[in-house]
Image: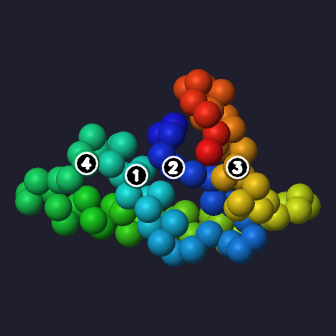
Amino acid sequence: MCRNIKTLFNFDPPATEDEIQAAALQFVRKLSGYNSPSKANEEAFHRAIDEVAEAAKKLLDSLVTQAEPRNRETELERARERNARRFGTAVE
């Protein structure tokens, strides 16, 4: 899985349209192998982003859980700590 695609489910506040769109963009980039498509593929590329974003939104809206919503700040701090351990850098 692409490391740039972040988990979007079960956060308080919920994922925004921009976050869903960004995840869809990363997914389509990974699948297509294009960071930026050629003019010939531009329409298909952008259509795929919209379709993936729509599917992701439907998925997020239909998922249920008994778990407490995660806090974005806490998750960000955990990610920083993991990166510090992984790359041997100091946590700022």
Q: In the rendering, which numbered label is found on residue 26?
A: 1
Amino acid type shown at disc 2:
Ile
Mark 3 surroundings within 10 Å by alpha-carbon count, few (fewer than 14), some (14 through 19), many (20 or more): few
* Mark-to-mark CA distance, 1 and 2: 6 Å
* Mark-to-mark CA distance, 3 and 1: 23 Å
Q: Quadrant of the C terminus?
A: top right
Q: Looking at the image, which residue is at 48% across and 46% down? A: 4
* Mark-to-mark CA distance, 3 and 2: 17 Å
Residue 54 is situated, as x and y percent measured from the top left of the image, at: 49, 70
Q: Looking at the image, which residue is at 57% across and 30% down? A: 89
Residue receiving disc 4:
35
Amino acid type shown at disc 4:
Asn
Sequence-wise, which precedes: disc 3 or disc 4? Answer: 4
Q: In the rendering, which numbered label is found on residue 77?
A: 3
Q: Looking at the image, which residue is at 44% across and 62% down? A: 22
Residue receiving disc 2:
5
Does 1 sit left or right of 44 as displayed? right
Sequence-wise, which precedes: disc 4 or disc 1? Answer: 1
